[in-house]
Amino acid sequence: MSEISYSKKNDRIECVRYKDWRKSYPPHTHTGHMTVGYIEEGCVCIVLNGEAKIYGAGEQFQIPPNTLHEIKTVGDECYSMVVLCTALEPDEIVAEDCARLDELQKSILENPENIYLIEQMAHDACISPFHMIREFKKAFGLTPHQFQMQCKVRKAQKLLEERPAAEVTFDAGFYDQSHMDRCFKKVVGLSPKEYKRAVKTDT
């Protein structure tokens, strides 16, 4: 029987366990988090910045912060793996990004629920919208809009630890329940309600 469970050790460490899993995950990033995975059974394809590599049972992989990646199944084979996500302190992250783009990323990350149009982002970064989108994706792996949607989902995940799914929708910045369900499932692979059932918080 396939299942997924989330276990938070503290505010910095989260462990995700995939058992006989078959879902693939589209390109995304983990802001400020180092991700380490260990394959228990089967195999999985990890794509880092467009470069794919297959990992089998007994192998591990690492994904640095702000690195575009995706997870793909291999054929019809299911996989079981454990993934540890560790939040890093700001001075632990090596960044070569423009200070204005750093500020823009931080603004989106801290308040993903706010309406923040591309034109306003470009104005705040003092560059043209086209250039801002291109440079942001170059620096962080996602376009500003993709990053904002990902941050909305991450905020929804955090809120779901203590509140019902119906109460999270607007506080996470989604238009309605179906909008959150659609975006959440695309990023997490589960509906908000399925995710809430899978979360286990260690005390």
Image (tube, rainbow, N blue to C red):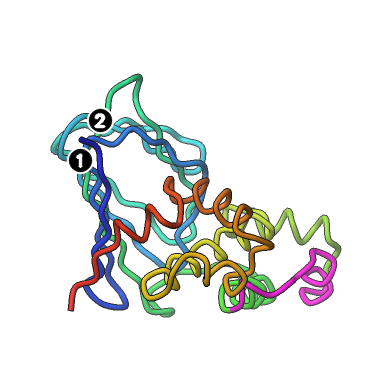
Q: Is residue 124 magenta?
A: yes
In the image, residue 108 above or below residue 77:
below
| Circle 2 residues within 10 Å: few <14, some 14–19, many ≥20 | many
According to the picture, the residue beneath numbered tag 2 turns out to be: 43
Q: Which residues are magenta?
A: 111-126
Q: Is residue 54 left or right of residue 115?
A: left
Q: Is residue 152 magenta?
A: no
According to the picture, the residue beneath numbered tag 1 turns out to be: 39
Q: Is residue 75 left or right of residue 129?
A: left
Q: Residue 120's x, y, as percent?
A: 82, 72
Residue occupying image coordinates x 52% and y 44%: 27
Q: Residue 202's x, y, as percent?
A: 19, 73
Q: Determine whether label 2 and label 1 are within 8 Å by CB.
A: yes
Residue 109: quarter of image: bottom right
Depth order, front residue of 77/51 = 77
Q: Amino acid at mark 2?
A: Cys
Residue 198: quarter of image: bottom left
Q: Is residue 181 left or right of residue 100?
A: left
